[in-house]
Image (spheres, grey):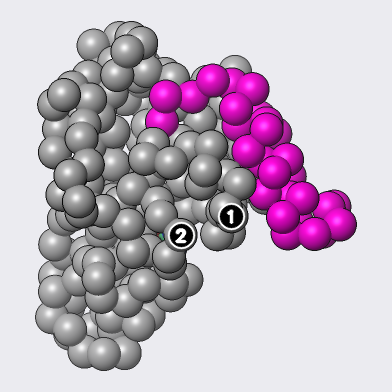
Amino acid sequence: MTRSPARLVVLVSGSGTNLQALLDACADPSYGAAVVAVGADRGEIEGLARAERAGIATFVHRVKEFESREAWDAALADTVASYEPDVVVLAGFMKLVGATFLERFAGRTVNTHPALSPSFPGMHGPADALAYGVKVTGCTLFVVDAGVDTGPIVAQTAVPVEDDDTTETLHERIKVAERQMLVEAVGRMAREGFTIDDRRVRFGS
Ligand code: GAR
């Protein structure tokens, strides 16, 4: 990263516990990153309230307010760009960003997913893992590409599946691991930089 602290824009769609973990980490100057704005695709969510309580700028772009998905994507990219992020973090953002956004922030947009990629991509990682009957699942932080949860992997943590798990109990256990993984990996990206060689992501310059 060229700037210290590294500037993070975080996009959320829900409760924002991953965002909160980043906000808490950023309170320590030695972490090396600062959340400069939080965006969402919907209003009245706890993720936005968390940002507001922390005194951080927020914005909302709802797909339905734009004439096309492409127009929404371009507006999202413009607003995110106005905050000059070093890294964009999708933390429970339940929309796929499009070509314009990806072009603008290629190689510096990361997403956290509640499954061990390449298993169980998409919106229902914990439910799909449970339905398949795996004994171990987990979470993955990856650099966003044009696919669905297919990008180069930055970090992963394994989480056991218990016999009596429901989707909710499993997802909550994954989220505990996920917050720790996200904070650790984003902090290293900010402090050490990172390279992507083919699909292999390494910290350091
Ligand atoms: C997280 O588990 C995140 O991985 C998941 O939503 C949750 C958001 O929690 N994202 C996806 O499933 C995206 N495909 P949070 O709002 O409490 O951070």
Q: Residues within 10 Å of mark 1 (few under 14, many from 20)?
A: some
Q: Position of residue 13 (x, y in %)?
A: 58, 52
Q: Residues within 10 Å of mark 2 (few under 14, many from 20)?
A: some
Find out whether residue 78 is within the magenta segment.
Answer: yes
**Residue 71 in sight:** yes
Q: Mark 2 is on which residue type? A: Ala
Q: In this figure, which residue is indicated by the disc labeled 2?
A: 146
Q: Which residues are magenta?
A: 58-87
Image quarter for residue 64? Answer: bottom right
The residue located at (32%, 13%) in the rendering is: 2
The residue located at (16%, 24%) in the rendering is: 205
Find out whether residue 193 is within the magenta segment.
Answer: no
How many numbered circles does the render carry?
2
Q: Position of residue 69 (x, y in %)?
A: 73, 59
Position of 138 relative to 49 (above/below): below
User: Which quarter holds ligand 1?
Assistant: bottom left
Q: In this figure, which residue is indicated by the disc labeled 1?
A: 98
